[in-house]
Amino acid sequence: MLLFATLIIISLMFYIFYKVRYYRTRMPMERKWLSGKSSIALGLFVALFGINQLFLYQTTTTYLVSAIFIVFGGLSIWNGFKMYKFYLPHAIKEAEHAETQA
């Protein structure tokens, strides 16, 4: 249980970290890339929260709600990973272009 609680807190901290970086940057492709990373962290938070609830309570309602959390977390991780992979080369090109401009 302590492991899941620690992982939940770490994933929430990563989500907040990436959202702060998202609001600080002005480059659009880097923003989308950071949005993908924050989506992965948020999905991990939600999925781990659902898994943690499975160990705490053993009721039908808990199983149903935990399954919903795990599915939505997994979908968020999958979507975030797709965004991350798609926008990474664009963000690299954008950073190189900004470096040559400065």
Image: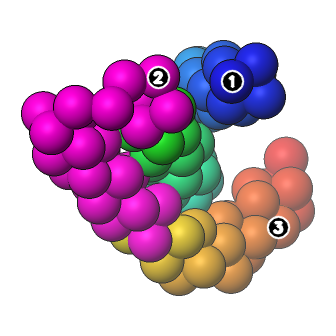
Amino acid bearing label 1? Met
Q: Secondary structure at mark 2?
A: helix
Neighbor class of circle 2 (other Cα within 10 Å; few <14, some 14-19, many 20+) is few
Three-letter code for the amino acid on which mark 3 is drawn:
Glu
Q: Is residue 93 left or right of residue 43?
A: right
Q: Are marks 1 and 3 in contact (CB under 8 Å)?
A: no
Residue 42: in sight, yes or no? no
Q: Is residue 30 left or right of residue 28?
A: right
33 in magenta: no
Question: Residue at the location (36% across, 52% down)?
Answer: 70
Q: Nearer the viewer, mark 2 or mark 3?
A: 2
Number of disc labels: 3
Tell me the residue that label 1 is attached to. 1
Do residues under tags 1 and 2 come within 8 Å of each other at their CB atoms? yes
- Label 1, label 2: how many angstroms apart (C-alpha)? 8 Å
Chain part drawn in magenta: 53-78
Badge 1 local density, few (<14 within 10 Å), some, or many (20+)? few
Q: Which residue is mark 3?
A: 96
**Picture layout, residue 19 above or below residue 60:** above
Which element type, helix, strand or loop, lies under badge 3? helix
Residue 22 falls in which quadrant of the image?
top right
15 above or below 70? above
First in sequence: mark 1 vs mark 2? 1
Image coords of residue 51 (percent x, y): 48, 42
Magenta segment: does it hold 56? yes
Q: Which residue is mark 2?
A: 56
Q: Position of residue 48 (x, y in %)?
A: 53, 40
Please tell me how crowded label 3 is: few (under 14), some (14-19), or many (20+) other residues with Cα within 10 Å: few
Residue at the outermost front position: 58
